[in-house]
Amino acid sequence: MNRFAARLAQDNIVLRHARTEILQVNVGKLCNLTCVHCHVNAGPKRKEIMTRETIERIIDWLAKTDIRIVDFTGGAPEMIPDFRHFVEQVKALQPSRHVIDRCNLTILLEPGYEDLPDFLARHRVEIIASMPCYTPDNVNAQRGEGVFDESIAALQLLNSLGYGIEPQLPLHLVYNPVGAFLPPVQAELEADYKRELKEHFGIVFNKLYTITNLPIGRFAAYLRHNNKLDEYMELLISAFNQATIDGLMCRNTMSVGWRGEVYDCDFNQQLDMQWENGASLFLWDVDPKKIHDREIMTGEHCFGCTAGAGSSCGGAIV
Ligand code: SF4
Ligand code: SF4
């Protein structure tokens, strides 16, 4: 039993899936950036991306469910050749589904993507954008030189299209710490972001989500390199908060990988914790009516989701 499962057992908790409200699709590891904290190890040279055939199979499966939200992540999801086709197919389902794009902002300014912001706005795609700070130093340190200025320009562009202003075009930002510490209080940080971005750059947005870095992928390598991995694990473990359990994203989300394989969350996906303990279980093998109450596969990284105010794709939990 891993230390997380043991901690849950201490409180007589078994972590189980509740109801699938969100299908989070990780379309691949291709990205225009190579951020220090990336749990996917994404980058410009990665070749693992979703094919058209896999997309069609996911759409067929989705059409038979009442899952309301499709949440695209990556990599930079917009970089796969069939990204727009995928969005159009999801929106064309009856009933139509809500689409979220987890966007690194800089992709919106890359050559060849000039019409992407307009495409997203036209299809009413919600944007959840990474923005680890409202000052250049922290952003550039974590995401690369020049990323801050590009992110600001991209946010201004999105505002000019109505994002963050019109109710049907939500724009949320994501903060994650630049080092081995927990995020500050979400509401307070959101107020700081709103004030600073408005005052200095005229930018508006809807919500700020604070997300804890989980000790996996490139962030774990970074911690190991700086001899901080054990210390960070201890910090997460000591901050365990039972009140976060009900709101953990693995309880209402299914995660799909670029080959169509199924996981409890994007973190488990990066750790190859595929359903059925690694046997080939793909989305199209899953009966959506039979996953209610299935036990979630956990590991020590899960302490990242239950530390302090908790952490999920929608930010703090409590
Ligand atoms: S954190 Fe996001 S933007 Fe950065 S390399 Fe990873 S996938 Fe790309
Ligand atoms: S990493 Fe978080 S979301 Fe994933 S299974 Fe563990 S607790 Fe759930």
Image (tube, rainbow, N blue to C red):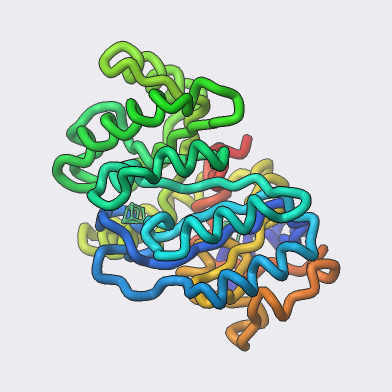
Residue 122, placed above or below residue 207: below
| Res 13 quadrant in image | bottom right
Image quadrant assignment for residue 166: top right
Observer able to see residue 310:
no
Quadrant in which ligand 1 is drawn: bottom left
Q: Residue furthest right?
A: 289
Residue 221, percent from left and from top: 28, 65
- Up the image or down, 188 lies above or below 213; here it is above
Left or right: residue 213 versus residue 268 is: left
Residue under the image location 26 percent in, 31 percent down: 153
Q: Is residue 42 above or below residue 102?
A: below
Q: Residue at x 31, y 34 (%)?
A: 154
Q: In terms of depth relative to the viewer, which is nearer, 318 or 165?
A: 165
Q: Position of residue 299 (x, y in %)?
A: 55, 67
Q: Is residue 124 visible?
A: yes
Q: Position of residue 58 (x, y in %)?
A: 64, 69
Residue 280, placed above or below residue 263? below
Quarter placement of the C terminus: top right
